[in-house]
Amino acid sequence: MGIPGRPHRAYRYVGPAGPLSLVRPGSGGRGIRSAADVEAWVAALPARELAEPFTFVVDTAGVLRLAPRRSEHVVCAGGAPVLAAGEMGFSRAASGAWVVGEVSNQSTGYCPDVVSWAAVADALDAAGTGHPGGYTHEVVFRRCPGCREVGIVREDDFVCVFCDRPLPSRWNVDGDPPPAAIPAGPGAV
């Protein structure tokens, strides 16, 4: 669970131009603000789509946005910066409510750090939707200071797969100074 009042970092899109060119006005993912929104979202989907996780982002207002799995994160976000991005799967709890059963920060367009979980937890808590309490699959992204390529760190091996140089231990994908922190929690602006 996120810590109310703790700022979340905003992540800008760092992926290729192709997906960014798909962003159109009104093309963002479906905003989820309540358990009823989750129920409506799931009810409108074909059963086969429930077998796979969905694309999600948490926008800078702290709202969870969902789109079909093969959607681009940057389109789901309407081209804007996000507090988190990845994939999320739902399942039914014993109570009958929809809950998040699996969730990752797998987004090669935004490459969010694993600490982005706090923004996801805050968005799910605000929507009254149960969750596992952390990413069920964490992806560690780093930019190589030598060749500038972005890669995924696997098995804690902080070595660039492109040029074999050491990778930093701290998240560094966005080479510009970090955007201003976004306040967290309900009522944040």
Image (cartoon, helix red, strand yellow):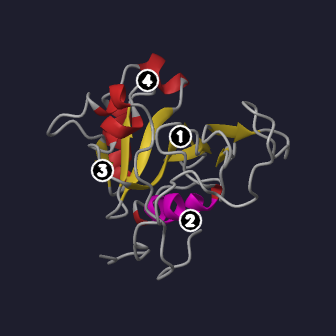
Label 1: how many residues lie within 10 Å, few (<14), some (14-19) or many (20+)? many
Q: Which residue is mark 2?
A: 118
Residue type highlighted by circle 1? Met
Give the labeled residue for mark 1.
88
Q: Are marks 3 and 1 in contact (CB under 8 Å)?
A: no
Q: Residue 1 placed where, x, y %? A: 59, 68
Residue 187 quadrant:
bottom left
> Distance of mark 2 from mark 1, alpha carbons?
15 Å
Which amino acid type is shown beneath numbered disc 2?
Ala
At 53% across and 36% down in the image, what residue appears? 108
Q: Which residues are magenta?
A: 115-125
- In the displayed structure, 144 sits above or below 6; it is above
Q: Position of residue 12 (x, y in %)?
A: 40, 52
Question: Farthest residue in the bottom direction?
Answer: 5
Describe the element under mark 3 as helix, strand or loop: loop
Q: On the image, which quarter does residue 30 sit in? A: top left
Q: Which element type, helix, strand or loop, lies under badge 4?
A: loop
Q: Which mark is residue 70?
A: 4
Does label 3 or label 1 sit earlier along the sequence? 3
Horizontal and vertical percent position of residue 89: 54, 37
The tag earlier along the polypeptide, 4 or 3, is: 4
